[in-house]
């Protein structure tokens, strides 16, 4: 079946693109993907999205965006696109059951925070554990938090957290850092930051009576000595991975896997647009994802009009 616009992925970018394309009478089809609503569905309180002075729960915000897109006629489908062919027009996409044709495609498959994969991490995500300091730092005022990682993102998260936390401990598995010298020195010069090196986190421990982070179980990589570090928050900062595997060889990407865009949200293939974290390695915020979702919808609408 042929469609004007197919949106691959949900979250703030996908739902906003759906809202704008549906209001433009383009009858978009949106596939929600493996994680409907994106990363915000594993976030508890969102206090930095405009229009919610009291804050909003992440899954609630995504449900509102989804309902708004559906209200204007978006065909929202569960499941995900498994294969694409951008070599011809109309584009061909397969959802595992059938082929769809699309005149234009908006990619909003997002990025996934790399996690440690240790006991307690999933259970405590949003309850003392986070993968985004700029999202959640304000919840950790005047307490001790840990940052796990040794790259630029870890140093940046640690420095940012010192605006709120009373103490920040960077935990790194080696003595050498992947971080650039300027970022590392900035962290080393910050009086609120201390370093625990040659150490890995084996487990995130919770209070017996409530779902809240209590401490980190640490293991020294040289001596194998095990210890506990009481903390009120833990930020996993080992990078993000854009969900772009499906587009390898079809869309131009940076070395890090993020999609390249030009003139707004245009990708290397005419008629294919990218919005949200899938093309954004820098900001990765709900509001910027929503903004680029709007841009992608407008870019797609204008491009389709030009084709006619």
Image: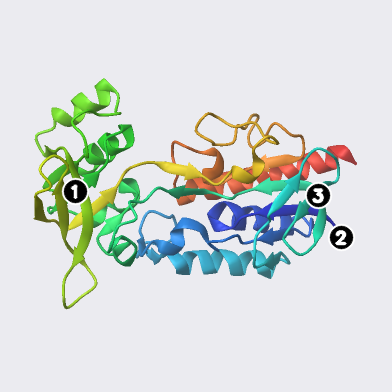
Closer to the N terminus: mark 1 or mark 2? 2
Crowd band around label 2 with a 10 angstrom C-alpha radius: few (<14), some (14–19), many (20+): few
Q: Where is residue 45 in the image (x, y as percent from the top left)?
A: 35, 63
Instruction: Assign the C terminus to one quadrant of the image.
Output: top right
Give the quadrant of residue 302: top right
The answer to whether residue 20 of the structure is visible from this angle is no
- In the displayed image of the protein, which residue is found farthest to the top? 181
Is residue 47 placed above or below 78 in the rendered structure?
above
Residue position for label 1: 146
Report the disc number at residue 92.
3
Report the disc number at residue 1.
2
Crowd band around label 1 with a 10 angstrom C-alpha radius: few (<14), some (14–19), many (20+): many
Who's the residue at 67% across and 70% down the image? 71
Who's the residue at 79% across and 55% down the image? 26
Is residue 14 placed above or below 279 in the rendered structure?
below
- In the displayed image of the protein, which residue is found farthest to the bottom? 209
- In the displayed image of the protein, which residue is found farthest to the right? 308
């Amino acid at each position: 079946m042929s469609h004007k616009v197919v949106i691959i992925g949900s979250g703030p970018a996908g739902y906003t693109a759906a809202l704008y394309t549906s209001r433009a009478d383009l009858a978009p089809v949106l596939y929600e993907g493996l994680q409907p609503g994106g990363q915000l569905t594993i976030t508890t309180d969102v206090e930095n999205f405009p229009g919610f002075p009291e804050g909003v729960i992440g899954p609630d915000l995504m449900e509102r965006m989804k309902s708004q897109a559906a209200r204007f006629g978006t065909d929202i489908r569960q499941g995900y696109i498994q294969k694409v062919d951008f070599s011809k027009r109309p584009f061909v996409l397969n959802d595992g059951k059938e082929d769809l044709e699309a005149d234009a495609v908006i990619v909003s498959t997002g990025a996934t925070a790399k996690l440690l994969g240790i006991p307690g991490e999933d259970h405590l995500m949003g309850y003392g554990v986070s993968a985004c300091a700029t999202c959640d730092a304000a919840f950790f005022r005047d307490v001790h938090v840990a940052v796990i990682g040794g790259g630029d993102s870890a140093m940046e998260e640690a420095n940012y957290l010192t605006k709120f936390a009373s103490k920040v401990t960077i935990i790194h598995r080696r003595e050498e850092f992947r971080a650039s010298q300027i970022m590392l020195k900035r962290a080393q010069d910050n009086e609120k930051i201390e370093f625990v090196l040659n150490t890995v986190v084996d487990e995130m421990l919770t209070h017996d009576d409530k779902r809240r982070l209590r401490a980190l179980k640490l293991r020294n990589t040289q001596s194998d000595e095990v210890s506990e570090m009481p903390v009120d928050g833990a930020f996993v900062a080992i990078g993000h991975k854009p969900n772009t595997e499906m587009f390898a060889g079809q869309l131009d990407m940076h070395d890090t896997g993020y999609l390249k865009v030009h003139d707004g949200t245009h990708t290397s293939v005419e008629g294919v647009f990218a919005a949200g974290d899938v093309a954004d390695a820098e900001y990765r915020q709900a509001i910027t994802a929503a903004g680029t979702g709007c841009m992608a919808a407008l870019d797609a609408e204008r491009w389709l009009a030009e084709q006619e």
